[in-house]
Amino acid sequence: MSTKRGTIYFDENLHRAVRLKAAETDRSISDVVNEAVRQYLAEDADDLAAFDDRASEPDLPFADVVKELRRRGKL
């Protein structure tokens, strides 16, 4: 896998935590950050897939939901 160099500015406490995590797991800071970014982007991909899966579902207006809850005595 090819790599690209980039500059990231961390909050001081976050940098300390990432440095410690890298040392604790015997990995580089780059490895720790790359893994975190991959996980973050994977969550976005999962969310987008869920939206696609539900695209054919009918819309349910919020006002209708509130009215139904009120009718049932839940509000």
Image: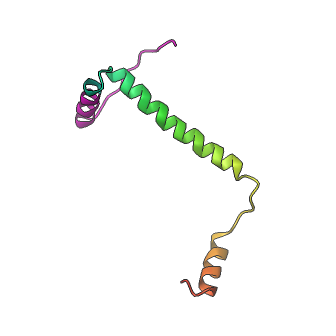
What is the number of callouts on the image?
Answer: 0
Q: Does residue 55 appear left or right of residue 42 in this picture?
A: right
Query: Magenta segment: does it hold 55?
Result: no
- Residue that appears at 36% across and 27% down: 32
- Residue that appears at 69% across and 46% down: 52
Q: Position of residue 58 (x, y in %)?
A: 75, 62
Classify 66 as above or below 5.
Answer: below
Q: Position of residue 18 (x, y in %)?
A: 29, 30
Q: How is the image coloured?
A: rainbow
Q: Does residue 55 appear left or right of residue 5 in this picture?
A: right
Q: Residue 27's image quarter?
A: top left
Classify 1 as above or below 54.
Answer: above
Query: Magenta segment: does it hold 6?
Result: yes
Q: Residue furthest top?
A: 2
Q: Position of residue 50 (x, y in %)?
A: 64, 48
Classify 46 as above or below 75.
Answer: above
Please report the bounds of the magenta region as a residue range: 1-21
